[in-house]
């Protein structure tokens, strides 16, 4: 699946205040994602990559973005699997010269991504919390049985039984 589809879904989720519309948009997207790409897609939707720490700090990302002379792609061609592979390489890069290698990987990804896709990727790399509604919907409604049953931050389990239970009023 193309990253642009994730961007479109997030824009639809952000544009509405209806919880039902948000859930339906996310469920539609997750139903179309290949099973092998579900963990990576949820990582993008929740701004919490499955690889964990990628070794890219906000200062390095801001400096790279400010100094970037890269022209973004005109048409969407980056897939979720492509982003996941780059994130895996970022997480595995260490030692002497790792900063330069990470910068080169990010420049290559930025060149292949459209401006809209790069905006999302920059937010994911920064761990942006602007996607909080996506976190609850994704973790609770993920069709993948291998997905963790705990929230990304370690909060109480988000199993279907818990999410189906009506909330008590204070």
Image: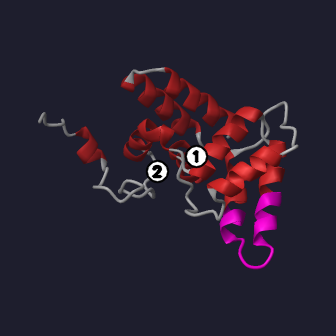
| In the foreground, 109 or 2 | 109
Q: Is residue 16 above or below residue 129?
A: above
Q: Quadrant of residue 98?
A: bottom right
Give residue 3's mark: none
Upstream in sequence: badge 2 or badge 1:
1
Q: Which residues are magenta?
A: 88-104
| Residue highlighted by disc 1 | 44
The reply, left or right, for residue 34 in relation to residue 130 is: right
In the displayed structure image, the side of residue 167 where residue 156 appears, left or right: right
Please tell me whether mark 1 sits on a helix, a strand or a loop.
helix
Say whether residue 63 is left or right of residue 21: right
Q: Residue at x 63, y 62 (%)?
A: 54
Residue 93 highlighted magenta (yes or no): yes
Q: Secondary structure at mark 2?
A: loop
Of tags 2 and 1, the one toward the viewer is 1
Look at 39% across and 21% down and name the residue there: 18
Q: Residue 149 at what x, y percent from top left?
A: 36, 56
Q: Could you say where residue 122 lies in the image, as x and y percent from the top left?
A: 66, 45
Q: Which residue is mark 2?
A: 144
Q: Residues within 10 Å of mark 2 (few under 14, many from 20)?
A: few
Q: Position of residue 84 (x, y in %)?
A: 67, 55
In the image: residue 92, left or right of residue 41: right
Q: Position of residue 6 (x, y in %)?
A: 61, 36
Residue at the (25%, 39%) spot, across then down: 164
Q: Residues within 10 Å of mark 1 (few under 14, many from 20)?
A: many
């Amino acid at each position: 699946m193309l990253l642009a589809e994730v961007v479109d879904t997030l824009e639809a989720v952000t544009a509405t205040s209806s919880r039902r519309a948000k859930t339906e948009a996310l469920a539609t997207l997750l139903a179309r994602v290949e099973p092998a790409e579900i963990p990576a897609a949820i990582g993008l939707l929740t701004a919490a990559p499955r690889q964990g720490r990628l070794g890219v700090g906000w200062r390095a990302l801001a400096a790279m973005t400010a100094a970037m002379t890269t022209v973004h792609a005109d048409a969407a061609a980056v897939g979720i699997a492509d982003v996941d592979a780059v994130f895996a390489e970022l997480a595995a890069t260490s030692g002497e010269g790792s900063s330069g290698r990470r910068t080169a990987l990010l420049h290559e990804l930025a060149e292949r991504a459209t401006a809209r896709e790069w905006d999302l990727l920059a937010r994911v790399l920064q761990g942006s919390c602007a996607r909080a509604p996506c976190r609850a919907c994704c973790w609770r409604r993920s069709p993948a049985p291998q997905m963790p049953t705990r929230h990304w931050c370690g909060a109480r389990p988000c199993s279907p039984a818990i999410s189906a239970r009506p909330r008590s009023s204070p």
